Image (spheres, grey):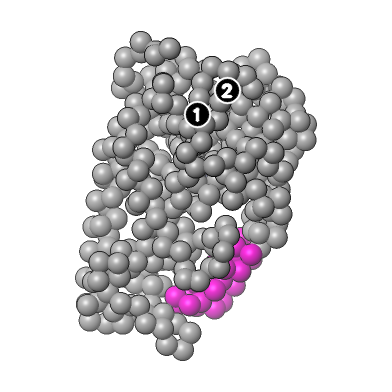
Amino acid sequence: MTSPDRPATSAEDALALAQRAGIHRIALPTPFLVGRVNCYLIEDEPLTLIDTGPNSGKSLDDLERSLAALGHRVEDLELIVVTHQHIDHVGLLEILARRSGAEVAALEALGPYLSEFSRNAAADDEFAQVVMRRHGVPGDLATVLGSLAAAFRAFGSSGHVTHALRDGEDLKLRDRTLQIFHRPGHSPSDTILWDAEREILIAGDHLLARISSNPLVSRPLSGPSEPRPRALLQYMESLQATRELPARLVLPGHGDPVLEHAELIDERLRMHRRRAARVHQILDGAALSAYEIAVRMWGNVAVTQAYLTLSEVLGHLDLLVASEQAVEREADGTSRFQAL
Ligand SMILES: [Zn+2]
């Protein structure tokens, strides 16, 4: 059945349209800079929750109250779908799955990661240490950031995936079919759910309305971590693919729905090319590490948000290297980039 709804023109409209399709946004608090995380309850069979929020009493309490307002309990959940591996999205997975007995669906490659979350999160942090030191982040700063990351790990949790999702396959609920697409870039496991009949896309952090989704340099889910994954290149490719979906509504992992996704994607792609051009200017004959470039571009933010800004700059350097405008050379354990 195709809904006769007119196109949504505001966030309220969009959320109302989603509700008429049985999809309810539940925004849960997180301890992170990004603010609240959006979970989505789909009233269908099975009763489905997309993402869980972080592992905190406050989030669980908020989730329980939001479910109650919709006439449900945690125990009623029958399926939990995870959009990606980040702790604000998977933190309550273990508790919710145990209390409800719900099936847990996630990208096939994410299963082993979630089954040993702490060990894998620790390996991610070690990988980040290697990347930071290789790209010029001072050792003491890298150490402090490493301890912060370790402290935040408690907001995550393990989980047992009972339904492995594959790229391109259909996840069938009673009243709808959600097509699964793997769209890596923000994280290696980014998974989006496409309802072709209703033209609604549930996107996790793949596309956010007000903030550009950071293509974090991450340890691959499987296989060797060398060479370093080109997160931004991968992300831009993923965005191009998503641009082709005739979505009238994108429901993201943070903030308001996206109404004009193709325009937003074009804007994001232009911004990345603009920033790459800026990095090219900064190089101007010098051989600089990614951290040195980040400090020139971002000032103090490059210190307080070192991994984020480093990932961003490395992404733009990868763009320059891919278009033969720069080269990367390693000497004495530090990578430096030079404009061509
Ligand atoms: Zn997130």
Name the one closer to the observer, 253 or 200: 200
Residue appearing at x 41%, y 21% in the figure: 197
Q: Which label sits on residue 112?
A: none
Is residue 42 visible from the viewing direction of this image? yes
How packed mark 1 is, by other alpha carbons closer than 10 Å (few <14, some 14-19, many 20 or more), is many
Look at the numbered disc 1 and give the secondary structure of its residue. Answer: strand
Name the one closer to the observer, 290 or 31: 290
Residue appearing at x 22%, y 81% in the figure: 285
Give the amino acid type for the residue marked by disc 1 in the picture: Leu
Queried whether the magenta region covers residue 95, the answer comes back as no
Disc on the earlier residue, 2 or 1: 2
The magenta segment is: 123-150
| Image position, residue 273 (x, y; %) | 25, 57
In the rendered image, the vertical position of residue 72 relative to residue 283, given as above or below: above
The residue labelled by disc 1 is 178
Name the one closer to the observer, 236 or 285: 236
Give the amino acid type for the residue marked by disc 2 in the picture: Leu
| Image position, residue 177 (x, y; %) | 50, 25
The quadrant in which the C terminus is found is: bottom left
In the image: residue 165, left or right of residue 306:
right
The quadrant in which the N terminus is found is: top left
Residue appearing at x 58%, y 60% in the figure: 222
The residue labelled by disc 2 is 173
Q: Are marks 2 and 1 in contact (CB under 8 Å)?
A: yes
User: How many numbered tags mark residues here?
Assistant: 2
| Image position, residue 92 (x, y; %) | 68, 40
